[in-house]
C-alpha cells in the first residue's frame, strides 16, 4: 500500500485488517480512510522517505567523499595556461623535477574525444596503434607507461564520458602509480595550451590553481613568424601579432572572472632568472623550492605524452635558458604595435609585472 508516495511497511502490517475493512466505506462517506494518528505517521514516514532519498542522492556522496583519507588531503591540480610556444613544456618538465610534483603535459588534448575528421591526429591514433610506438617522457612507450598505459586501455570504451570524468580517471591512475612508488606527490601539473576549459570548477575533492605563462610579444611573434619570413610572405609578423593580442587579452579576462588563484609568470622572467621565478612559484604553491627544478631533463619524473618536441631534447632540457633570437631581428611592425598603450600595457602586465597574483582575493600568497 502507498501513502503519500511512501511505503507503509510495518505500519501496514499493524493496521492491515483495519485498512481492508474500513477503507472503502470511509472514502464513500468523504472521510479519510484511516485514523488521523495513522495518517500523521504516514505523512511523517513519507517525508522521511523523500528526505532520505534526497540525502542519499545529494549529500551522502559528498560526505563519503570527504571521509576518504585520500580525499581529505585534497588533490591539487596546477593548470599551466598560455599561448603555445611560450615555454610551457620546459616549465612542465621543471615542475615535474620537484619531488612533490608530477607533470602530465597536455593531458586534456589526449583526453578530449577526437572529432570524426581528426582520425589521423595524435590523440585518435594514441587510442589505437600509436600507443605502442610513441614515447612518454618516463622513457617507456605510451602503452607501457604506468600512468598512460592503463588510461589508454580504458579510454576507447569510455570516450563518451564527460572530459571531467576522464581527467578524474587519469588522476586516479597517477594516484595508483604514486602509491606504488611510495612517493608523496602534492601537485599534478597539466599544460594544455590555448585551452580555457577549467575542469572541476565545483569539485570539493580538488584544488585547482592556474599558472598563466606569457612570452614577450616581440619574442613570441619573432618565433611564430619564422616560416612566413622564410617564404617571403608580406608582413609575416602581422598574423602572429594579432593572435598574441587577441588570445592574451581574452585569456586574461577569463582568468580574472574564473575565481581561481592565478599566478602570472613571464617567460622572460622564468628563462632569464629561473631560480628566483621558481622560488616565488614554490612559495605560492606552498612547497619548498628544490634545486632539481633547475635541471629539468636530469630530474623530471613527468609523464608527458603530448607537448612540444623539445621534451625529448636532453640538451635543451638540461637547464632553463632564454631564447634571445629575436633581439637582433625584432619586427618593426611589433615595435610600432608597442607604441599603442593598450598593447604595451598588456605586454608589461603579463610578462614583467612584479605583482604575480591576478586574483588577489583567491590567491594564498
Ligand atoms: Zn610515462
Image: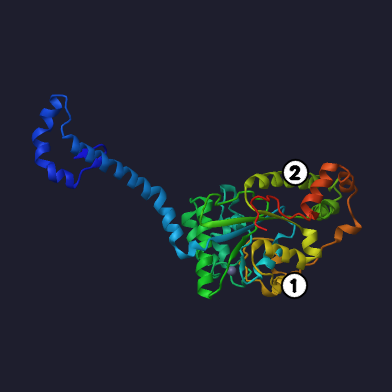
Identify which residue, 156 or 279, lies in the foreground.
Answer: 279
Q: Is residue 22 above or below residue 82?
A: above
Percent coordinates x, y for residue 259 in the rendering: 62, 48
Percent coordinates x, y for residue 166 in the rendering: 51, 56
Percent coordinates x, y for residue 237 in the rendering: 84, 48
Residue at 49% across, 62% down: 72
Quadrant for the C terminus in the image: bottom right
Q: Earlier in the sequence, mark 2 or mark 1?
A: 2
SS for tag 2?
helix
Percent coordinates x, y for residue 89 in the rendering: 70, 62
Choose top left, top right, bottom left or bottom right for residue 133: bottom right
SS for tag 1?
loop
Q: Is residue 337 left or right of residue 195?
A: right
Disc 2 under 8 Å from ligand 1? The reply is no
The residue where tag 2 is placed is 246
Disc 1 under 8 Å from ligand 1? The reply is no
* Numbered-mark total: 2
Q: Is residue 270 above or below residue 118?
A: below
**Label 2 to label 1: alpha-carbon separation:** 33 Å
Identify which residue, 329 or 37, lies in the foreground.
Answer: 37
Q: Residues within 10 Å of mark 2 (few under 14, many from 20)?
A: few
Q: Residues within 10 Å of mark 1 (few under 14, many from 20)?
A: some
Identify which residue, 202 or 316, lies in the foreground.
Answer: 202
Residue at 18% across, 30% down: 32
Q: Is residue 341 left or right of residue 97?
A: right
The residue where tag 1 is placed is 318
Q: Are marks 2 and 1 in contact (CB under 8 Å)?
A: no
Amino acid at each position: 500500500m502507498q501513502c503519500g508516495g511512501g511505503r507503509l511497511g510495518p505500519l501496514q502490517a499493524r493496521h492491515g485488517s483495519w485498512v481492508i475493512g474500513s477503507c472503502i466505506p470511509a472514502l464513500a462517506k468523504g472521510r479519510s480512510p484511516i485514523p488521523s494518528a495513522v495518517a500523521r505517521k504516514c505523512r511523517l514516514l513519507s517525508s522521511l522517505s523523500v528526505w532520505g532519498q534526497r540525502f542519499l542522492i545529494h549529500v551522502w556522496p559528498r560526505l563519503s567523499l570527504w571521509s576518504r583519507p585520500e580525499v581529505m588531503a585534497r588533490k591539487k591540480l596546477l593548470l599551466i595556461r598560455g599561448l603555445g610556444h611560450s615555454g610551457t613544456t620546459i616549465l612542465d618538465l621543471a615542475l615535474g623535477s620537484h619531488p612533490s610534483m608530477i607533470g602530465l603535459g597536455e593531458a586534456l588534448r589526449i583526453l578530449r574525444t577526437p572529432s570524426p575528421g581528426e582520425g589521423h591526429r595524435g590523440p585518435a591514433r594514441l587510442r589505437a596503434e600509436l600507443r605502442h610506438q610513441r614515447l612518454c617522457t618516463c622513457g617507456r612507450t605510451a602503452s607501457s607507461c604506468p600512468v598512460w598505459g592503463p588510461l589508454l586501455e580504458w579510454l576507447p570504451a569510455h570516450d563518451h564520458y564527460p572530459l571531467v570524468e576522464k581527467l578524474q580517471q587519469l588522476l586516479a591512475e597517477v594516484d595508483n602509480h604514486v602509491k606504488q612508488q611510495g612517493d608523496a606527490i602534492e601537485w599534478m601539473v597539466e599544460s594544455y595550451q590555448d585551452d580555457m576549459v577549467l575542469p572541476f570548477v565545483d569539485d570539493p575533492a580538488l584544488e585547482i590553481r592556474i599558472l598563466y605563462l606569457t612570452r614577450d610579444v616581440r619574442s613570441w611573434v619573432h618565433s611564430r613568424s619564422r616560416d612566413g619570413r622564410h617564404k617571403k610572405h608580406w608582413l609575416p609578423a602581422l598574423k602572429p601579432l594579432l593572435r598574441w593580442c587577441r588570445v592574451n587579452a581574452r585569456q586574461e579576462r577569463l582568468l580574472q572572472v574564473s575565481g581561481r588563484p592565478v599566478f602570472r609568470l613571464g617567460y622572460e622572467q622564468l628563462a632569464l632568472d629561473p631560480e628566483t621565478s621558481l622560488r616565488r612559484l614554490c612559495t605560492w604553491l606552498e612547497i619548498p623550492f628544490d634545486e632539481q627544478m633547475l635541471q629539468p631533463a636530469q630530474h623530471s619524473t613527468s609523464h608527458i605524452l603530448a607537448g612540444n618536441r623539445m621534451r625529448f631534447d636532453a640538451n635543451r632540457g638540461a637547464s632553463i635558458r632564454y631564447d634571445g633570437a629575436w633581439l637582433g631581428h625584432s619586427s618593426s611592425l611589433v615595435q610600432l604595435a608597442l607604441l599603442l598603450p593598450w598593447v604595451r600595457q598588456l605586454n608589461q602586465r603579463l610578462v614583467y609585472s612584479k605583482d604575480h597574483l591576478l586574483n588577489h582575493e583567491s590567491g594564498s600568497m
